Image: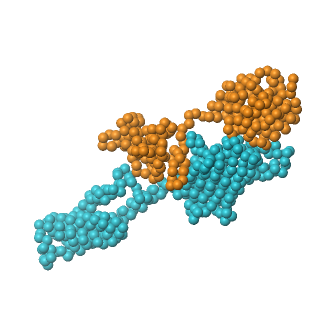
Chain colours: A cyan, B orange
């Protein structure tokens, strides 16, 4: 059962196995007190004898409670009001009979005219409705407060996780090794092949702009992310020569979908660094985006070395996972699968809502976000 | 005296070309007799050609530059070439090692060439200390199991051990539990325990290993045995006597 709170704030066990029992224990004393208050009120107002009034009041109140429990147990799917509508008259009747028996009257006398049965029943119904309404209101208030608390907690922790993940990402972003290597190549190509040097510099500009954009605004699209990935791969293809082949596939219609920045790029970087760079012959990276129903599926697949079981998940991957979790409220996922005969496939699934509108506003590491 | 010979080792073909051009300008009599793209090829080439100097990229696929240098120890002069490896720079700066930074600067290359020329007649310096330091930085030990391969329906999926809250042994297999997810793995619990980081995963029972970070709190049952409550889900794990000392109050 989703959302079922297994322990309340006192840490008491309220596992689904014994909820009624627990509720009875909690509500019992309260119901007894209310019954007593009603009896005192009736005794003072009507001038009835105190003890029979108290006994009747308790008998009727507890009977209604009993029928409420039996009702909600027998008809677990029925609405609260239906159960109440059934249990009120039944409880009032049973309570009147039991109360009469306990106060030393023959229950049969109830059906003779001389007895204030009608008044007893009527007050039972009136007070029953009032008390039930009170409990229903109270339960709703408590549930509302708990839900609010849960929601607040969830939102706070999601926001915190996201902010932390983004900070880490910023720190890990532009890898010095990549930067210097790229510059080395540009330097070399300037004399040898100026046109290629120019293209490499242009790609590098796209890459830098994309990587730095997040410091200003968090809103990017899938298309922009793929442009960044493409620029990165083009640079790497110059570096690695024939050792790298790559593809980026995305239907044109999907390019406009909003996507938090740098979800794909770290995965592509990982595929290159841990998958293909250490592999002697190099290999192939395939990046793809597809729609499955409402969800957006992003995939980075390589035929490199695969995941070494003893390599700790790097900053990049951990980061992407944390952010996907945070922006989708737990509904999105990042799964890793080994590829036959060798390699790794990382798949991000973003459910419709998360992919369409990155609900939690992305607090970019802007100065105003800092304390 | 015959002309000095060299091989260039780098996994990025473009950079080899550039180094070759720079060397031709600075050291015309040096004969670059070969180029290799990875460590194994470099070693094979060395055995075949016995060059005087090897220009060696530190990070390469297959055998790393460090391993190649170890294999070449004392048999030729080695010049390390690196783009930006903090660990490498640190190791280099504490020893008389020839190294070049990418992109290779003309002046820096000139200094290196001058030093190499004067040293060529002498036996190569002992680099073992540097190589060991580099090796240590390249392979930080010890390493623990970080990923599990689990079967999810038809698919093999990789799960980070950091996501697993609890490993529980069943009759024939081990269950890995994470929140409300549950996977079957075939590695016996005992074997698993040996490969997991003992700082992050604690054995609490003959049949259970729990991730320390997944523990929400520890209570006591009627008999005073500690009971571990996990952050996610409602599952509890009884700590058996042998491991109870870990949960004694500080």
In this rendering, position of residue B23 left or right of residue B234: right
**Residue located farthest toward the front when viewing the structure as drawn:** B48
Q: Nearer the viewer, residue A168 or B226?
A: B226
Residue A60 lies, in percent from the top left, at 22, 67
Asked if B201 appears above or below B4 in the picture, the reply is: below
Please tell me which residue lies in front, B88 or A287.
A287
Image coords of residue A155 (percent x, y): 51, 55
Question: Which quadrant, please, contains the C terminus of chain B?
Answer: top left
B243 on left or right of B77: left
User: Can residue B225 be spotted in the picture?
Assistant: yes
Q: Using the image as rendered, state which of residue A227 and residue B14 is in the foreground.
A: B14
Q: Give coordinates of residue A358: x percent, y percent.
A: 59, 59
Residue in the picture at 30% in, 41% down: B223
- Image: A74 above or below A183: below
Above or below residue A190? Residue A289 is below
Please tell me which residue is depicted at 70% across the width and 34% down the height of the picture: B65
Q: How many marks?
A: 0
The quarter holding residue A292 reads: bottom right
Q: Please indicate whether residue A312 sits to the left or right of residue B246 in the image.
A: right
| Residue A104 image point, x, y percent | 11, 66
Q: Residue at x 84, y 48 (%)?
A: A193
Residue depicted at x 84% and y 28% = B4
Question: Based on the displayed image, in which of its 4 quarters is residue A132 positioned?
Answer: bottom left
Q: Quadrant of the N terminus of chain B?
A: top right
Q: Residue furthest top?
A: B122
- Residue, far bottom: A113
Q: Is residue B248 visible?
A: no
């Amino acid at each position: 059962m989703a959302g079922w709170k297994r322990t309340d704030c006192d840490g008491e066990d309220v596992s689904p196995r014994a909820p009624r029992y627990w509720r009875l224990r909690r509500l019992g004393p309260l119901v007894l007190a209310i019954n007593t208050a009603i009896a005192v009120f009736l005794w003072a107002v009507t001038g009835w004898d105190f003890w029979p009034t108290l006994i009747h009041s308790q008998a009727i109140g507890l009977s209604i409670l009993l029928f409420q429990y039996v009702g909600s147990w027998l008809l677990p799917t029925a609405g609260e009001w239906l159960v109440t509508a059934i249990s009120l008259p039944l409880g009032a009747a049973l309570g009147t009979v039991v109360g009469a028996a306990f106060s030393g009257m023959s229950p049969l006398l109830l059906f003779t005219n001389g007895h204030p049965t009608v008044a007893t029943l009527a007050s039972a119904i009136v007070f029953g409705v009032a008390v039930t309404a009170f409990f229903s209101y109270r339960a709703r208030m408590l549930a509302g407060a708990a839900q609010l608390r849960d929601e607040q907690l969830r939102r706070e922790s999601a926001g915190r996780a996201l902010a932390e993940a983004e900070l880490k990402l910023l720190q890990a972003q532009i890898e010095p090794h990549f930067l210097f290597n790229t510059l080395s190549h540009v330097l070399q190509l300037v004399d040898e092949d100026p046109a290629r040097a120019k293209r490499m510099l242009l790609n590098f500009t796209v890459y830098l702009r994309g990587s730095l954009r997040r410091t200003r605004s968090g809103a990017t699209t899938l298309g922009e992310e793929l442009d960044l990935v493409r620029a990165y791969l083009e640079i790497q293809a110059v570096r690695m020569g024939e050792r790298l082949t790559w593809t980026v596939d995305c239907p044109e219609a999907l390019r406009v979908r909003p996507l938090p920045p740098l979800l794909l790029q770290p995965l592509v970087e990982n595929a290159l660094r841990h998958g293909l760079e250490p592999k002697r012959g190099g290999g192939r990276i395939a990046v793809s985006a597809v729609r499955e129903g409402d969800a957006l599926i992003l995939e980075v697949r390589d035929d490199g070395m695969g995941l070494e079981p003893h390599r700790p998940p790097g900053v990049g991957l951990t980061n992407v996972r944390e952010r996907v979790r945070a922006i989708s409220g737990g509904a999105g996922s990042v799964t890793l699968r080994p590829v036959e005969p060798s390699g790794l496939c990382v798949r991000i699934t973003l459910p419709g809502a998360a992919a369409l509108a990155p609900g939690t506003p992305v607090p970019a590491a802007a100065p105003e976000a800092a304390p | 005296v015959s002309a000095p010979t060299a091989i260039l080792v780098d996994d990025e073909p473009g950079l080899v070309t550039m180094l070759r051009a720079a060397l031709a300008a600075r050291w015309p009599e040096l004969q670059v007799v070969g180029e290799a793209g990875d460590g194994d090829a470099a070693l094979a080439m060395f055995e075949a050609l016995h060059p005087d100097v090897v220009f060696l990229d530190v990070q390469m696929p297959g055998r790393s530059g460090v391993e190649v240098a170890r294999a070449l120890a004392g048999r030729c002069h080695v010049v390390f070439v690196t783009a930006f490896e903090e660990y490498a720079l640190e190791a280099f700066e504490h020893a008389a090692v020839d190294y070049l930074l990418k992109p290779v600067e003309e002046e820096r290359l000139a200094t290196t060439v001058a030093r190499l020329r004067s040293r060529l007649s002498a036996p190569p310096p002992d680099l073992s200390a540097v190589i060991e330091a580099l090796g240590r930085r390249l392979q930080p030990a010890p390493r623990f199991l970080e990923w599990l391969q689990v079967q999810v329906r038809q698919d093999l999926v990789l799960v980070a051990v950091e996501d697993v809250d609890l490993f529980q042994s069943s009759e024939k297999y081990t269950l890995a539990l994470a929140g409300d997810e549950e996977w079957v793995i075939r590695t016996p619990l005992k074997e698993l325990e040996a490969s997991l980081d003992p700082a992050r995963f604690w054995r609490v029972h003959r049949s259970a290993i729990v991730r320390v970070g997944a523990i929400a709190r520890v209570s006591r049952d009627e008999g005073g045995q500690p009971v571990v409550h996990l952050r996610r889900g409602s599952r509890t794990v009884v700590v058996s006597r042998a491991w109870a000392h870990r949960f004694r109050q500080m």
